[in-house]
Amino acid sequence: MGKLNKRLLEFIETVPDGKLEGFPPDDGELYSDEDFHLTMKKTTAQNPAKVVLKILLSSACSISTVKNLDPEFLYLSHCVVGVDDTAAMNRVALKGGMTI
């Protein structure tokens, strides 16, 4: 899965800073391309507030080694970050949360 790993790292680096900080009030997709989706879900029980960031495989993924996998259940990165964390901190967290 070397190509997938390389492409996922590229995706994390290309997410605009504005999508990785100052999160919107509603859960949902923050950013996507043809291969991946970055989603966010706020947690309510923690103080200071946190959000869960997940990167999922897109159903239109062009990477041949994963085309037959079910994208609905495939999380490629998962992390919990603070709502006040910087984009750089959140990129590090996404890379550290990679599951491939």
Image (spheres, grey):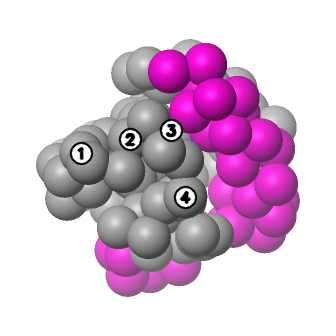
Which amino acid type is shown beneath numbered disc 3?
Val
**Closer-to-camera residue (67/43):** 67
Q: CA distance from mark 2 to mark 3?
A: 28 Å
Counting from the top left corner in percent of width and height, residue 75 is at 32, 41
Which amino acid type is shown beneath numbered disc 4?
Ser
Counting from the top left corner in percent of width and height, residue 85 is at 68, 42
Counting from the top left corner in percent of width and height, residue 1 is at 50, 21
Callout 2 crowding tier (Cα within 10 Å): few <14, some 14–19, many ≥20 = some
Q: Residue beneath label 2, please?
A: 66
Which of pointers 4 and 3 lies earlier in the amino acid sequence?
4
Label 2 or label 3, whichever lies nearer to me, is: 2
Which amino acid type is shown beneath numbered disc 2?
Val
Residue that extends furthest to the front in the rendered view of this protein: 64
**Closer-to-camera residue (97/25):** 97
Q: CA distance from mark 3 to mark 1?
A: 28 Å
Asked if the residues shown at circle 2 and circle 3 are in contact, with their CB atoms under 8 angstroms apart, the answer is no
Q: Which residue is painted at 81% across and 64% down in the image?
A: 16
Q: Which residue is painted at 19% across and 52% down in the image?
A: 70
Q: Residue beneath label 4, please?
A: 62
Which of pointers 4 and 1 lies earlier in the amino acid sequence?
4
**Closer-to-camera residue (48/76):** 76
For the question of whether residue 29 can be seen, the reply is yes
Q: Which mark is residue 69?
A: 1
